Amino acid sequence: MSKKANYSYVGISFIILLFGILFIPKIIDRISNKDINRNYESRSGSVLKNTEAPTSVDKLDYLVINGKRKKVPNFSFTDQNGNTITNNDYLGKVYIVEFFFTTCPTICPRMNRNLVDIQNTFKNETDFGVASFSIMPDTDTPEKLKEYAQNYGITNPDWHLMTGDKQDVYNLANIGFNIFVDVENFEHSGDFALVDKNGFLRSRKDNFGNPKIFYKGVISEQEKVDEDGNPQEISMLKEDIAKLLKE
């Protein structure tokens, strides 16, 4: 090997050594002081990848649409006991909203078993309730809803299973709560909405800063994930109910 080649290798080694002395301590210092963002971002600032699960927050966000906090609209339906229930009956209570029907053979039984689990978690809370709206109000009579409640072990006096005008149910779901419902084809979302004591829709934000809006209602805590790998959100919902109960 020529002397010229040896000089080149010595020069390269010196540069690498100098870089290590000057810059590595600075990089370590920046990491220690959390100056480096752990999320990968594009030049525009949008997150490209974030694999961390949504984190717990002390205060839940409001769902804001067109600059206004989304509030539960007025509604009036008949529950399993034949009583007229309106949105005013839920004021002062934290409650979950779902849309279902009693003869649903797929997601509804799973949703309502999860809701019974939540009911039992907060059995000593007088300010907690559930609003279940049937998307088959023509056949889900108060009598049938009461039988359904008994079969599932629904005991919370503020858990109302409601029936009423089909168009009113459709409007309440799709416009009032932004939850998909097709009453003609008996299709509906398996999501739950969470409402605070003042009638506002509440949720936490995901890692991208967007409100989650809804909670997955089909996957149980015991299942942990569904067949597609989506994690359960019942634990998250329980945490957020507890937070709203303290407000």
Image (spheres, rainbow, N blue to C red):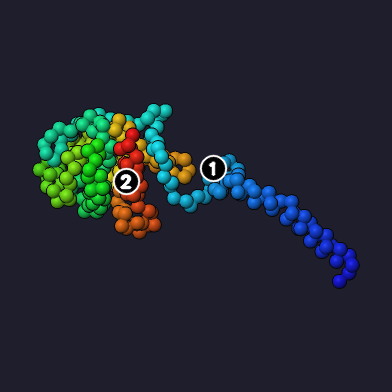
* Left or right of 173, for residue 148: left
Instruction: Give the residue pinned by disc 2.
Output: 238
Q: CA distance from mark 1 to mark 2?
A: 31 Å
Q: Residue at x 44, y 44 (%)?
A: 206
Which three-letter amino acid code belongs to the residue tagged 1?
Ser
Using residue 74 as the reference point, say whether residue 46 is left or right of it.
right
* Among numbered discs 1 and 2, the one appearing first in the sequence: 1
- Residue tagged 1: 46
How far across and how far down the image is residue 78, in percent? 15, 35
Q: Nearer the viewer, residue 186 or 8?
A: 8
Closer to us: mark 1 or mark 2? 2
Q: Position of residue 209 (x, y in %)?
A: 47, 40
- Is residue 85 visible in the rendered image? The answer is yes
Give the quarter of the figure containing the C terminus: top left
Q: Amino acid at mark 2?
A: Lys
Residue 164, image x and y in percent?
17, 36
Instruction: Please state which of residues 47 and 36 is positioned toward the viewer in this rendering.
Output: 36
52, 59: nearer the viewer: 59
The quadrant where residue 69 appears: top left
Image quarter (top left, top right, bottom left or bottom right) of the N terminus: bottom right
Name the residue located 38 percent from the left edge and 53 percent from the top edge.
231
